[in-house]
Amino acid sequence: MSENKSYNTINGYPTLRLGYAEVILLGRWNGLSNALYSLQKDNILWVQYNKNTALPIVETYTLLNGSVEVRYDGKSRLLKVGETIDASLYENTLFLYGNTDAELLIKTSYEEFEPEFFETQLLQEEADAIDALDGYTYNHCNRIKDYSLEVWTHLGLPKENIRILRWGAYFHDIGKRAIPIEVLNKPGELTACEWEIMKTHTIEGAKIMREHKVEWLKDAAIIVEQHHERYDGSGYPYGLKADEITLEASIVAVVDAFDAMTTNRVYKKALPIKDAIQELVNEKGKQFNPKIVDAFIEVLKRKNYKWE
Ligand SMILES: [Fe+2]
């Protein structure tokens, strides 16, 4: 833990601050890592059991306090305080939704939990660096990540890609770190030249991902690289078309555009949700992959058109 910084520990315990949740690694007993997971109200803890390892993995979640809903395969129920969920019994992704702030005790085989915990700490440092660029970024990245994952799950796409999509979606704009701040935060319209610089955030971002010390981020680089490509080939940086663009990047493109349309920014007012949806529909087959637009609208419908 040579890289430990004060914000990475609480009372000496390694801590992960995710913004929507906090995870404190309490210690290792009988080969199991014990962690306290504080989930904030209206946020989701995604549970995807990993069956593809040589060792049998223990992974359980016990609700200590608060109200949490278990959502699985379109059904939901309340989790009782003291009740334990055994992740190995669930084939698909399980969602633990915080109706209130809640605390869960996670017990996991340490070989599975700890490398990911410490890697995520490193990723979180990246995320904090992006957040420092402007106040808008953090919530934006989280929304893009959550909705991208929902669209992916809705389409029944392979769950093995979820980790890559999660971080590719979250870091889609990581390349903005390489853009001069005067261009990035310019209040007025960008000149043609500044716009060209701005567009390089795709390639610069992919480079950061490929060179990152968290090895597997390389696989997420392509999402970052392609998130401004358009279905009809009019996007950047390469002008890729239709199936030349990965589904992951096509999803991020739709969700990102929707977020931009429906969020108030200093230089523009938010569009009402229904107008933004109409815009997505108008751009089906032009800017956006039609299949992804349809899936995203379904996901929105299921959430009663809430965007938060
Ligand atoms: Fe971008």
Image (tube, helix red, strand yellow):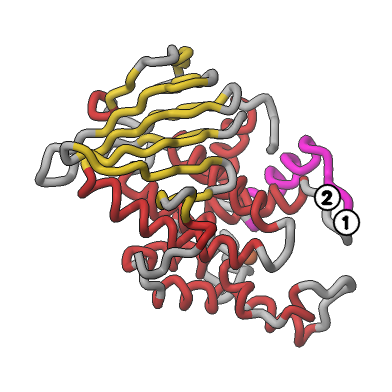
Q: Is residue 183 left or right of residue 142?
A: right
Q: Is residue 32 above or below residue 244?
A: above
Q: Is residue 222 above or below residue 115?
A: below
Residue indicated by mark 2:
264
Q: Is residue 180 visible?
A: yes
The kind of residue tagged 2 is: Asn
Q: Is residue 90 left or right of residue 252?
A: left
C-alpha span from label 1 to label 2: 6 Å
- Viewer-nearest residue: 279 or 218: 218
- Viewer-nearest residue: 149 or 177: 177
For label 2, count other residues whose C-alpha is less than 10 Å away and answer few (under 14), some (14-19) or many (20+): few
At horizontal 55% and vertical 61% (from top left) the residue drawn is: 127
In the rendered image, the quadrant that contains the N terminus is bottom left
First to last magenta residue range: 268-287
Residue 63 at x, y percent in the picture: 42, 22
Question: Callout 1: helix, strand or loop?
Answer: loop
In the rendered image, the quadrant that contains the C terminus is top right
Residue 268 shows which numbered tag?
1
Residue sitting farthest toward the front: 11
At horizontal 69% and vertical 30% (from top left) the residue drawn is: 305
Cβ of mark 2 under 8 A from ligand 1: no
Does the CB distance between marks 1 and 2 fall below 8 Å?
A: yes
The kind of residue tagged 1 is: Lys
| Residue 172 covered by magenta stretch | no
Cβ of mark 1 under 8 A from ligand 1: no
